[in-house]
Image: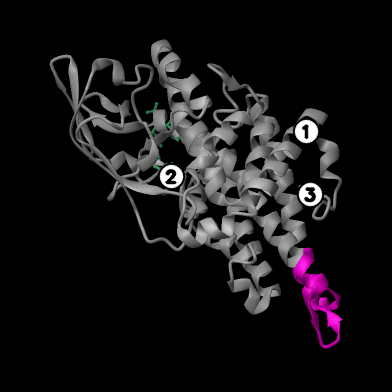
Amino acid sequence: MSDISDLIDFDSLLTSEELALRDLVRSFVDSEIKPNIAGWYEKGHFPVEIVPQLAKLGLLGMHLKGYGCAGRSAVEYGLAGAELEAGDSGTRTLVSVQGSLAMSAIYKHGSEDQKQEWLPAMAAGEVIGCFGLTEPTAGSDPGSMTSYARRDGSDWILNGAKRWIGLASVAQVAVIWAQTKDGVRGFLVPTSTPGFTATPIGPKLSMRSSIQCDIELTDVRLPESSVLPNVVGLKGPFSCLNEARYGIIWGAMGAARDSFEAALDYSKGRMQFDKPLAGYQLTQQKLVDMALEINKGFLLALHLGRLKDAGRLQPDQISVGKLNNCREAIKIAREARTILGGNGITLDYSPLRHANNLESVRTYEGTDEIHTLILGQKLTGVPAFR
Ligand code: TGC
């Protein structure tokens, strides 16, 4: 939350360490992201050059303990995610793909040797990771994936295709999930391995300052040591999606807050019919409705974060946050744009950029529809997926 949008003294719910971390990330976003994001977005530039700074701030794999990671709490991770996404969803996505997905997969399911090999370098930003689950014909239903790994002596041979994989073309290691004769397994694939190619998808109308790729896997030969040994089945990737979905709960509210603040600020200075837009009741109604949802969204995020830190957060509770906060954030970003009038369609103002980004955010890591059905199953006891 920020002083401008906080109607409920939200900050009094945070510790001094949490506030300090939030302020540190906010100041980084104010100095390094906000002045540059319009240009990056216009050019479709993914700012890989900020990775060392994100590492120096301790933001890569920040919720993991040991292996050079910062060992921060879930609430601190969430607060950082909100600040990063107040800059741009692409920046939070970078940290999320690296920490919540690629590093979490190794941390949760990897061998000690795999953790030692990859995690310190990834926390330091020397190695970028990606996470390949979705396929061209398997999005909401990853169980229908067709990528397949077969044995050849003690090696594995991996074939298949992945789509919408963040960071893949700049990554040095890919966590690839594939069917095997025993069920879905995870593989650590150095992206220099012959047969691995990653091609950015574009042009895009959303997340233009981020990279999502098609991956082709053609007879990729991997040693036995590349398989994640500690999990078989979809619970492997789903356990990582839980981490990324949790971060989105906070991140979406960061984008909403920044949109609201842009609209509030503009409304105070923009004169029409001899008074500022902020003086019109219709504008105040919009601003108040936005602020209420932002305050409620942050409270929900904090509650879920406290549950996570207590080890009690359940996957369906993550769906409550992901569904609600993405849905409200996109409404807020669009409503904020209306206050900006025609000027709101330029890159001089953040709301439409945030709204376009949030189209991706509401879609990845489980669409609105998937999270609705997860909660429908929770309420009724009846799965409606198939
Ligand atoms: P289902 O039979 O229900 O479950 C299979 C196994 O997984 C377990 N499980 C979970 N474990 C941990 N956390 C969760 N949230 C879990 N959900 C399920 C489950 O207990 C079971 O374990 P076991 O031991 O019995 O085998 O599987 P299902 O496929 O029928 O589940 C249905 C559904 C809809 C919930 C699931 O398919 C789903 O969540 N679909 C959405 C997938 C999604 O979010 N995809 C986005 C991926 S993003 C991406 O690939 C790109 S990364 C982002 C980037 O790079 O930018």
Contact, CB < 8 Å: mark 1 with mark 3?
Answer: no
Tag 2's secondary structure?
loop
Q: Which residue is mark 1?
A: 20
The CA span between labels 2 and 1 is: 43 Å
The image position of residue 90, as x and y in percent, is: 52, 49
Quadrant of the image where one finds ligand 1? top left
* Quadrant in the rendering for residue 178: top left
Residue 112 sits above or below residue 92 on the image:
above
The CA span between labels 3 and 2 is: 40 Å
Q: Which residue is mark 3?
A: 2
Tag 1's secondary structure?
helix
- What amino acid is at disc 3? Ser
The image position of residue 50, as x and y in percent, is: 55, 40
Q: Which residue is mark 2?
A: 383
The image position of residue 336, as x and y in percent, is: 68, 67
- Asked whether, in this view, residue 111 is left or right of residue 26, the answer is left
Look at the image and tell me whether residue 385 can be seen: no
Give the residue drawn at x 61%, y 29%: 56
* Quadrant in the rendering for residue 286: bottom right
Magenta segment boundaries in residue numbering? 265-288
The CA span between labels 1 and 3 is: 13 Å
Look at the image and tell me whether residue 195 can be seen: yes
All told, the count of numbered labels is: 3
- What amino acid is at disc 2? Pro
Identify the mark nearer the N-term, 1 or 3.
3
